[in-house]
Amino acid sequence: MLAAEDQRIQESETDRDRLVIKIQICVSVLMVIALSLHLAEIGLIGLGVIILASSLLGETNEHNLGKAFVEGLPFASLLVVFFAIVAMINDQEMFTPVMEWVLSMDGRMQVFMVFLTNGALSAISDNVFVATIYMDQISPLLEAGVLSRELYDAQSVAVVMGTGIPSMSTPNGQAAFLFLLMSGIAPRIRLGYVRMVFMALPYFIITTITAGVIMYNWL
């Protein structure tokens, strides 16, 4: 079915359609290069991509440009809600007791618990914000001489792995999963929140156990 649909689309393509695809590929490559080399802030790179693509394609009607953002509106709205929730959590210092409890531990257990608590908090909120809050807590400890550079580096790795691996247990832990859940594809393939949790469960269990063993034994 997919092969037949692909053949039908290719047969109906005009020279202009093929040129549009080539331009989009070139702009995509430039975007990847700019992001990988950190040539500018992410927002500026995104704005540059929009300007470059629209100008090269001759698209100047703002109503047509607006259609490209329709799919992302539910996701963007949800992100705004997350911003408000996490800002409130940070302002009320709701994560502070957990962080203080973890940082009161010693050695490998502290690094391991940083990994676990980051994953748990990321699963119920958002991994990027949890990582930011955690790093804001431990960075002053390094500057004050409470943490050694070696332990700080190990905790930084634990924060990254904790917010990146166990957080996949729920869609709100990973922005990519959340975007898929909020997209127009989700209802067509009957993808709901609970179903996505069950689909991610095997990967969550295996990767979390593997990462946890590495955290405890090698960091």
Image: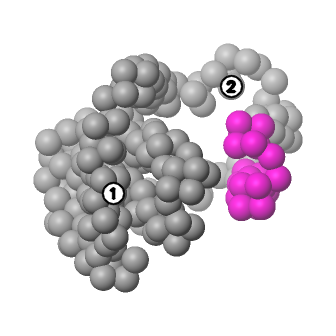
Of 16 and 26, the residue lying toward us: 26
Amino acid, disc 1: Val
Does residue 22 show up?
Answer: no
State the residue lying farthest toward the top: 63
The numbered disc on residue 1 is none
Does residue 191 show up?
Answer: yes
Give the image quarter of residue 124. Answer: top left
Which residue is tagged 1? 114
Give the residue displayed 23% in from the left and 62% down from the top.
Answer: 204
Of 203 and 70, the residue lying toward us: 203
The numbered disc on residue 65 is 2
Where is residue 180 drawn, in percent x and y?
A: 37, 43
Question: Is the residue 129 above or below the residue 219 in the image?
Answer: above
Q: Main secondary structure of the magenta part?
A: helix
Give the residue displayed 73% in from the left and 18% down from the top.
Answer: 62
Q: Which residues are magenta?
A: 24-46
Give the image quarter of residue 74. Answer: top left
Could you tell whether 70 is left or right of 121 in the image? Answer: right
